[in-house]
């Protein structure tokens, strides 16, 4: 569910998905739900995830004590979660009962550390879709400066039965 489109109406390009909509779209929950909001969603094209980085994040206790730096792998996970929301939002009812599984990452580059107090904007742009496989370019920025980039590939699959 997004907060800018009235219920029952088609989503306008560039709409926002709030935290409730994110949790409806993807199965992640604390502490692995890493994005707070998805803005500028354009079906089958692009979306931007927002991550407000807080000193209270559980990973900062060990990465690194007295010098907190967000792990690069979690920045990539933010890209993957944003891409998953784009996929589910694009497919709508066709994504019901399915989940987006991360398949690969290519060309990951980390440009500067992300630290508490930063707001990371994670921009994903669909490069291609072949059947259930989606490929997106991801770029993470803080204050307009690129901090990381990667190419993400993911597949939409039937949701596994609960354990």
Image (spheres, grey):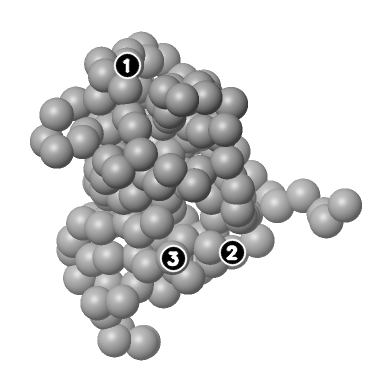
Label 3 environment density (alpha carbons within 10 Å; few <14, some 14–19, many ≥20):
some
Q: CA distance from mark 1 to mark 3?
A: 27 Å
Per the image, the residue denoted by label 2 is 96
Say which residue label 3 marks. 19
Please tell me whether residue 99 is drawn above or below residue 21 in the rendered image. above
Q: Secondary structure at mark 2?
A: loop
Total labels drawn: 3
Residue 83 makes an appearance in the image: no
Q: Quadrant of residue 155?
A: top right
User: Which of the 4 image quadrants contains residue 62?
Assistant: top right
Residue at the spot x=57%, y=41% of the render? Answer: 58
Q: Secondary structure at mark 3?
A: helix
Compare marks 1 and 3 and give the one earlier in the sequence.
3
**Badge 1 vs badge 2, beta-carbon distance below 8 Å:** no
Query: Which numbered disc covers residue 110?
Result: 1
Disc 1 to disc 2, how far (Cα)? 34 Å
Q: Nearer the viewer, residue 97 or 25?
A: 25
Query: Which residue occupies the extreme front position in the image?
Result: 66
29 sits to left or right of 69: right
86 vs 148, nearest the viewer: 148
> Is residue 125 depicted above or below 49 in this figure?
above
Residue 83 locus on image (x, y percent) = 40, 43
**Nearest to viewer (mark 2 / mark 3):** 3
Residue at 34 percent across and 72 percent down: it is 2
Quadrant, the N terminus: bottom left
> Label 1's element?
strand
């Amino acid at each position: 569910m997004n907060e800018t489109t009235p219920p029952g109406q088609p989503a306008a390009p560039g709409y926002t998905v709030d935290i409730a909509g994110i949790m409806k779209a993807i199965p992640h929950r604390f502490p692995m739900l890493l994005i707070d909001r998805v803005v500028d969603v354009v079906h089958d094209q692009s979306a931007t995830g927002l991550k407000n980085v807080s000193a209270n994040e559980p990973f900062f206790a060990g990465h690194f004590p007295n010098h907190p730096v967000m792990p690069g792998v979690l920045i990539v996970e933010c890209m993957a979660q944003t891409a998953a929301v784009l996929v589910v939002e694009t497919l709508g009812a066709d994504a019901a009962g399915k989940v987006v599984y991360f398949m690969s990452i290519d060309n990951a580059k980390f440009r500067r550390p992300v630290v508490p107090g930063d707001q990371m904007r994670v921009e994903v742009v669909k490069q291609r879709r072949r059947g259930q496989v989606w490929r997106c370019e991801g770029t993470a920025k803080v204050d307009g400066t690129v901090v990381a980039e990667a190419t993400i590939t993911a597949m939409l699959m039937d949701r596994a039965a609960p354990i």
